[in-house]
Image (spheres, rainbow, N blue to C red):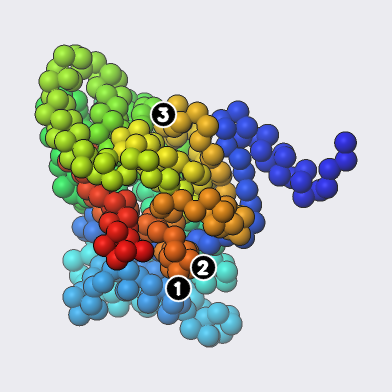
Amino acid sequence: MNLPAAKLVDCQAEIAVSDIGARHESGERAVFCGLTSIIWLHRKIQDAFFLVVGSRTCAHLIQSAAGVMIFAEPRFATAVLEERDLAGLADCHDELDRMVARIVERRPEIRNLFLVSSCPSEVIKLDLENAAQRLNSRYHGRIRFFDYSGSGIETTFTQGEDSCLSRIGRQLPTATDETPSLLVVGTLPDVVEDQFQRLFDALGIGPVAFLPPRSLSDLPAVGESTRLLLAQPYLGETARVLLGRGARLLDAPYPLGAEGTLEWLRAAAREFNVDEALFEQITAAPLQRARLALEGYRERLAGKRISFLPDSQLEIPLARFLTRECGAELVEVGTPYFDRQILKAELPLLPPQTRLIEGQHLNRQLDRVRETRPDLTVCGLGIANPLEAEGLRTKWSIELLFSPIQGFEQAGDLAELFCRPLLRQQKLGF
């Protein structure tokens, strides 16, 4: 049978992922910039400064997303590439060195500085990896320099964190102690990290470290005795770097909702041989609180038809939470990248006939949203307003990155985020 070339490509892509029920699409894309991750990373890593090498647009993006005034002395800035830099009339490395010297003079307390590349700096092939090595030699013993990509070219915005943590992962000290340790990977709000630490302590699991840490002076060691527990489902590159250092990944759903958090903790408990009776005892009270918090929201979400457009890579765990714990119906679940290795435990928890799409063909996906008209579409903020204008309710996926949503105590808050657009629709009488 002769198939058109374009159709043949689609078939080949589908074959590659057909055994896991996903279909691949590629075409027009709408992505948000990876520089956005600086907002939650700089809040978490309290002894680091983030210097973006980019354009004025990059500076405006970070400033507006952070909502911090310049006079508040935030721990991020933008080295703006001017026309002379882009035209090759200036030595960008000399300019970068001068900018770093000014920052160090103004902020002598800085001990760690991230050089973050952007679309403009990557287009002109500015090598920030070599720049970081050069500056590490110059400021040896005083400031440690890292580099990573925050570019929005062919990436989604959560990959900024993955790129950052994978760079840190390469510089973690090597563990020499053969005693098993747990490394929780993924940026968590401090309140959530503290809640998890208390549960691990009560279960007798330890030592436990978190990546990223609140201070880069406390970098955890990694080696063959390290067990990895991912807190975010978009850290594939970071996981592979740590696996390459000898660590072992624990298969677990992500800690979203009561069920996800319970099974996430259970994966660690089994690895560290925690008695099942003790596990049930320690988790009983927070599990009950989470289920009670979800009851009211379940009434509002039960039977609601929800679609996910690919944006944050949180889509699959969120879809599992909404269908299993809130009674929602999944119309379509799109995700930018489908990483089989780190989503292994999530897939069996989705309804068998879930329409799962990897990649993005924006026009086709929007056509299906308009055709099926779900009660709620989870998507990027650039797509949300046009859909709202067509009478379709939306939820910005980026809001889920700025809100504490992991863990037992946040299960009700997570469900509420999806209820808000529906409640707004009801109050306004749409």
Return the disc, 2 or 3, that comes first in the chain's sequence.
Answer: 2
Local packing at callout 2 (Cα closer than 10 Å; few below 14, some 14-19, many 20+) is many
Q: How many marks?
A: 3
Distance of mark 2 from mark 1, alpha carbons? 7 Å
Q: Secondary structure at mark 2?
A: helix
As shown in the figure, which amino acid type bears the numbered disc 1?
Gly
Residue 183 coordinates in the image, percent (x, y): 29, 35
Horizontally, residue 245 falls left or right of residue 20, namely left
Residue 134 coordinates in the image, percent (x, y): 42, 63
Q: Which mark is residue 119?
A: 2
Residue found farthest to the front: 429
Whether tag 2 and tag 1 are in contact, CB under 8 A, the answer is: yes
Q: Which residue is tagged 3? A: 349
Task: Say if 92 sits above or below 244 in the image.
Answer: below
Horizontally, residue 62 falls left or right of residue 216, namely right
Residue sitting nearer the eye, 81 or 233: 233
Quarter of the rendering containing residue 261: top left
> Residue 9, can we see it?
yes
Task: Say if 18 sits above or below 43 in the image.
Answer: above
Task: Say if 364 sits above or below 323 in the image.
Answer: below
Of tags 2 and 3, the one toward the viewer is 3
Q: Which residue is tagged 1? A: 54
Return the disc, 2 or 1, that comes first in the chain's sequence.
Answer: 1
Q: Secondary structure at mark 1?
A: strand
Location of the C terminus (image quadrant): bottom left
- The residue located at (27%, 40%) in the rendering is 298
- The residue located at (38%, 45%) in the rendering is 304
Q: Secondary structure at mark 3?
A: helix
> Residue 408, can we see it?
no
